[in-house]
Amino acid sequence: MAQRFRWTHTLADGRDATVSRVAGAHESGDDARRRYDCRLPSDVTASTPDERVRMTREDGDGDDRLIVVVPDGAGVVRLRLTAEDGRSAIPLLGPTLGAALTDALRGDGDAARSLVAARGTAVAAVHACAHALDTEGIVALVDALADASGTASDELHARRYALCRAAARGTNGLAVTGPEAFEALVDGLDSAAEIGEVDALDALGDLVAVHGLDTVRALGYDLVRLAHRGDGRFRAYWLAALARDRGIDDARDVAGAHESGDDDYARLKDRAVTAEYRERGAAWRALCGPASRRSRETFRYVLANACYWTGETGRTDARADELCYEGALAAVPADLDWIRVRARYERARAVGHRHQSATNHALAIAAFERARDVAASCPDDDVAPWDPLYSRTVVASNARSAAGDHAGAVGVLEDGLDALAAYDIPETRADEIRHHLRGQRHERLALLARREDDGAVETHLDAAVEHYEAADLDRSRDRVAAKRDDAANEDATDRARRAARSAGGAGPAPRPPSDDTGPSLADIPDLHDSLTASDPNAVGSADPGVVERGPRDPEY
């Protein structure tokens, strides 16, 4: 890991300014301050909104020297640099935050937590500090923040691909300059144990999903080489983006122009139709080239399947899956209802899970309700309405607890359990879901019991542990078991303080969500994988995968 004592900042007009941190004894003590030596073009003006910051400018031959002194307590100062073509800003750390960054990189958990507290979120802390770090240092900071706090870990897990997107398009701070640097960042984030896997192809698919193909080209990548890399799933990302943004004919042209290898359409189609579940995406992708040389409708049929099955079997946390479903919807023929319904349903679920992980409760609830509406409008059993209902119940209860309304969260969970009981859910999955929701219910009841002098806190936490154990939710089980131990060790003074708060009437103002105020959101990503992932033995069919054609589908 490496902090940078000197770095280059690109101005709005493309010219460069250099920043050097002048280290020394003045950075500590009662009158601590940080001093920065900046060299910038003489026609660039510098300013800062913080009146505590001292700036001294010396004219030079071509470039001016600007000395910026940041006193303790200033936090992060934004040095605004204005050129004729626009303005940019350099974040400069004050002594306390600068020291916290150094200590966090050395493994000090308290320092890492102080950085997050100072900036409000872990992602904001990364952006504020990135200018003073190289790629290795950025990865080390992410790792340190995630390791120090479950809340930060959840946040960085939810936004790890967004960090990659920001770096790919950034100019200063969190920014990379080419494929090698981009993949060094991706590989580094992937090595951070507490934020989940990060994959380069999926990060590029995520970038395409949000900003289009030109951003990948601008980063220096060859799209043709990416299409043949690994399992070839970037080919689906590429064609999906073309179908979504430019139309089916552009996708068809690219599929035909860059095809190589087997051109036996009939044999490849038979392989795609009969492929095992996990192999369907690759099998349909291999058929896109040969299909491009057949009719337009045939290509649409093949591309819709290729995009859909790449998203369905990929199940990444990147927005590449959403891109695939959007590509499937752009390509699907008018009379191929099976793919259209499934793509709408899975896109809504993918959006819901993305917002759920990011604790965007209202957006997640809306997305899961869209998925449930799609399922309700489907005359067959192709999609399961209970799945988004279950996910919506989890999110809605978390939203209530995040607002301090634990009683309301209990009501949501009980209503969800009653509603789910009406569905014919596969037995094993139904047991897992029931135990998960009942475990969350008991956690909320334990929080409510803490408001009473003789509340049955330990009884509810014991019940929650048992339910999580039955559902194989190890993280939840261990977390609640630790809370159970804390409750058992609570002394008489703590119980009296809790009773006094309860007697005060309205009680304390709701606190923001944390590991102490309800079921941890750290469990949500794992739950997505174990409880809501696609299952080849899902409701309605022994195999929900695409077949050559359904009774109402045309033959292509």
Image (cartoon, grey):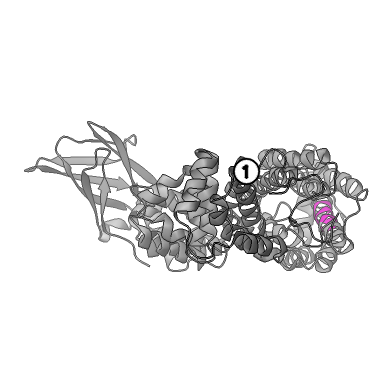
Residue drawn at x 83%, y 54% as measured from the top left = 437
Q: Is residue 170 left or right of residue 159?
A: left
Q: Which amino acid does label 1 sit on?
A: Glu
Does the magenta run of residues contain 438? yes
Residue 103, quarter of picture: bottom left
Q: Give 483 or 155, whichever is nearer the viewer.
A: 155
Q: Is residue 199 above or below residue 90?
A: below
Residue drawn at x 38%, y 47% as measured from the top left = 170
**Residue 306 visible in the picture:** yes
Does the magenta run of residues contain 498? no
Q: Give 38 or 497, whichever is nearer the viewer.
A: 38
Q: Is residue 459 left or right of residue 512?
A: right
| Residue tagged 1 | 297
Residue 247 lies, in percent from the top left, at 53, 38
Q: Is residue 62 above or below residue 540?
A: above
- Residue at the farthest left position: 61
> Majority secondary structure of the magenta segment?
helix
Residue 427 lies, in percent from the top left, at 89, 62
- Crowding around mark 1 (Cα neighbors within 10 Å: few <14, some 14 to 19, many 20+) is some
Residue 12 lies, in percent from the top left, at 28, 38
